[in-house]
Amino acid sequence: MELETLALRAGYKPGNGETHTMPIYQSTTYEYTSADHMAHLFDQPTEGHIYSRISNPTVGFVEEKIAAMEGGVGALMTTSGQAASLLSVLNICKAGDHILCTAGVYGGTVNLFGVTLKRFGIDCTFVSPDATMEELNAAVRENTRLVFSETLTNPTLVVCDIEKFAGFAHSHGIPLIVDNTFATPMLCRPFDFGADIVTHSTTKYMDGHAVVVGGVIVDGGKFDWTSGKFPEFTEPDPTYHGTVYANYGAPAYIIKCRMQLMRDFGVLPSAQDAFLLDLGLQTLPVRMKQHCENAQKVAEFLEKSPKVEFVNYPGLPSSDQHEKAKKYLPKGCSGVISFSIKGPRENAARFIDALQLASTVTHVADIRTLALQPANTTHRQLSDEQLRAGGVTPGLIRFSVGLESIDDILADVAQALEKV
Ligand SMILES: *Cc1c(COP(=O)(O)O)cnc(C)c1O
């Protein structure tokens, strides 16, 4: 079925006389009639629910829907996008291992991989998204376990050449994990281009209404974990009576992630939060279409303004990301634009202050139009030189185009530019 249908119909399917909308199973525990059945579930936790730290029926319906929309074989929801990034890596890495990540990914990911995981003994090398195969090969070590990238980076809007990174990862027998938060499956399905695992911060477009922080990991089901490079998939797990995860076949990765990491770390969202996320997912297809259409018009408008230094939006033919966008994001480039106002930091601050419709919040990918000046907020501690070194200009504005009338959004941008 098409994505528009899956967004409404995948996951929960009511039986005769059951509720038309997905029920919220607000329970920590599940009752069984025999001790034997319970004992069996402790050996095979995929065959039923035991405890809502590991799985829950409502959460399960939403996981099934997201897996279907991404074209994967299974999914695991988490309480944040950060938790999804963390678990996606820990499921294959231990202290002493090494990972590769493309530079320019979400700041929280850079901190998690570059600082926090390092403290736990997992080393990360950041590689340029434009690196050649020779440069990438040179970054690989004996203990490199995976490659991590982002479909469309937040907030620099670099489009990942997923096929290149998948081919590179596979030539070393390791998987490619892609954070697909900004694109969502509506604009790009990384599995179609060879990615092995997809992660999301569902906090952004999937929820869309800014009501629940959450994340998800989706298993593409095609990676071969039995090459000998990943003994944790082929050797018995003593904490589950000798379970060999590779024996689960296609969804081995996501089952292992739930059975070991979700059991031990306990970052499963509540049924209520899964229900709220599902409301967002149902309208994701129509919302993404409109976000793309509105953002394209805003980007074209900004590009013509003499007060604007440059506009980053892969949907613009002038963008150096446009060729990649035509391949990976043919249906649109999401609602997020970054652009720079000419002159000192204060000019951009004046623009933000003059906006009447757009909200000033630390968030992106919302149904409402949002604007933020990194130099004055998230990157405030940096000098102009440090900012530019990180690809952020003092006058940079991160503009997340919402679903208000395009005429009202453009009028707001125009009047705010006049005040600069
Ligand atoms: C926001 C974001 C995250 C982190 O997600 P949270 O839900 O805030 O924990 C990860 N990756 C990307 C691309 C993001 O935009």
Image (tube, rainbow, N blue to C red):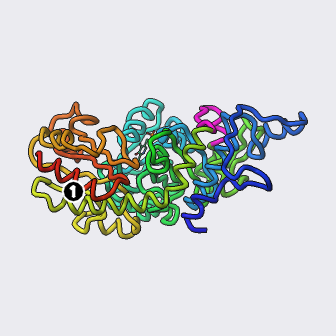
Q: Is residue 103 magenta?
A: no
Q: Residue at x 30, y 62 (%)?
A: 296
Is 116 displayed left or right of 319 in the figure?
Answer: right
Is 81 located above or below residue 18 in the figure? above
Residue 87 x/y as whole percent: 54, 40
Quadrant containing the N terminus in the rendered view: bottom right
Q: For the residue marked with disc 1, what is the amino acid?
A: Val
Is 81 displayed left or right of 271 in the figure?
Answer: left
Residue 215 x/y as whole percent: 52, 43
Which type of secondary structure does the marked residue at label 1 adopt?
Answer: strand
Is 346 located above or below residue 144 in the figure? above
Mark 1, other Cα within 10 Å: few <14 / some 14–19 / many ≥20: many
Residue 223 visible in this rendered orientation of the protein = no
Residue 256 x/y as whole percent: 65, 44
Residue 215 visible in this rendered orientation of the protein = yes
| Foreground residue among 220 and 232 | 220
| Foreground residue among 391 and 102 | 391
Residue under label 1: 311
Which quadrant does ligand 1 occupy?
top left
Residue 397 x/y as whole percent: 23, 46
Is 41 displayed left or right of 118 in the figure?
Answer: right
Q: Is residue 264 magenta?
A: yes
Q: State which region is magenta.
A: 258-271
Q: Residue at x 14, y 39 (%)?
A: 345
Is 389 located above or below residue 383 in the figure? below
